[in-house]
Image (spheres, helix red, strand yellow):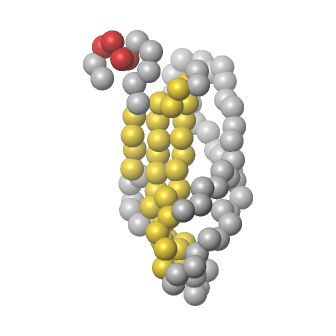
């Protein structure tokens, strides 16, 4: 398994409330050696150096047609508690 970092960005400081971001990155290098391979595209978010959120999409890569297909409509999400959250309800 080969891990590729496509983009890394620092954002902030931000005002309290909802924020939206558009992150554009180059396509990952193809490492497909079989006709079909499933890959995880993972977006990891950190706050003060601690990971707080991971959003992942499973992608099927077709080596014969050079196509990628997202395998689920909804991403897989994992939340991590940090700071005061650890003391409250995690």
Q: Position of residue 43 (x, y in %)?
A: 54, 46
The residue located at (46%, 36%) in the rendering is: 53
Q: Position of residue 5 (x, y in %)?
A: 66, 50
State which quarter of the image contains the N terminus: bottom right
Residue 69 lies left or right of residue 49; in this view the side is left
The residue located at (61%, 39%) in the rendering is: 21
The residue located at (40%, 44%) in the rendering is: 77
Name the quadrant containing residue 83: top left
Q: Position of residue 34 (x, y in %)?
A: 52, 81
Residue 67 visible? The answer is: no
Going by the picture, which residue comes out furthest to the front? 1
Name the quadrant containing residue 28: bottom right
Residue 9 visible? The answer is: yes
Please tell me whether residue 44 is drawn above or below residue 59 in the rendered image.
above
The residue located at (47%, 30%) in the rendering is: 52
> Relative to the observer, which residue lies in front, 24 or 63?
63
State which quarter of the image contains the C terminus: top left
Residue 22 lies left or right of residue 18; in this view the side is right
Going by the picture, which residue comes out furthest to the bottom? 64
Please tell me whether residue 34 is drawn above or below residue 25 in the rendered image.
below
Number of callouts in the render? 0
> Relative to the observer, which residue lies in front, 12 or 81?
81
């Amino acid at each position: 398994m080969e891990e590729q970092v496509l983009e890394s960005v620092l954002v902030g400081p931000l005002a309290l409330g909802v924020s939206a971001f558009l992150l554009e990155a180059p396509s990952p290098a193809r490492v497909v050696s079989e006709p079909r391979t499933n890959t995880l595209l993972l977006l990891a978010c950190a706050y003060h150096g601690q990971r707080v959120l991971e959003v992942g999409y499973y992608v099927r890569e077709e080596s014969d047609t050079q196509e990628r297909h997202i395998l689920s409509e909804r991403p897989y999400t994992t939340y991590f508690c940090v700071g005061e959250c650890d003391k409250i309800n995690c």
